[in-house]
Amino acid sequence: MENKLFQWLRGSKSKTLPQTHGLSDIKNKFEVSLVEGEFKPAESAEVLLSLLNYKIKFHSVRLLNLKETSTSDPEVSQKRIEELKVAKQEVTKLVLEARNKGWNLEINSTIQISPKKP
């Protein structure tokens, strides 16, 4: 299904995507619980640093594309990359402190998705 979604997003917007579990009924806001629970420091590092690394990679690729096409200001992606790198350093410190003190970390992350007209 994921592969078909990406194909659809790259192709014609007039094509309709197959309906799935009522998600087409999104009116105001949809929430996804991305991470929830208590984790050992090593598990916390894996989850959090993977997410941060992915977002850094996403914005880095976006920044390269913006520089090639010159259709938008790349400053937003550059700023976001810097913010994510700082967050990555802070998360690393927190995980190391938790490991050194024998703590687990409770992580809760919910993504809120709201449809917006361009």
Image: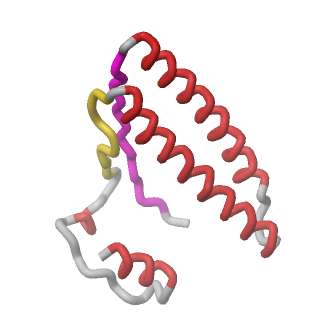
Q: Position of residue 35 (x, y in %)?
A: 33, 40
Front one among 34 and 50 = 50
Tell me which segment is drawn in magenta. Answer: 103-116
Q: Position of residue 97 (x, y in %)?
A: 50, 16
Examine the rendered structure and indicate whether residue 93 appears above or below residue 31: above
**Image quadrant occupied by the N terminus:** bottom left
- State the residue at coordinates (51%, 22%): 96
Extreme residue in the left direction:
21
The answer to whether 59 appears left or right of 12 in the picture is right
Q: Position of residue 72 (x, y in %)?
A: 76, 65
Front one among 10 and 42 = 42
Examine the rendered structure and indicate whether residue 112 appears above or below residue 11: above
Quarter of the image holding residue 111?
A: top left
Quarter of the image holding residue 79?
A: top right
Q: Position of residue 24 (x, y in %)?
A: 27, 68
In magenta stretch: residue 108 = yes
Examine the rendered structure and indicate whether residue 100 appears above or below residue 9: above
Extreme residue in the top direction:
101
Quarter of the image holding residue 106?
A: top left
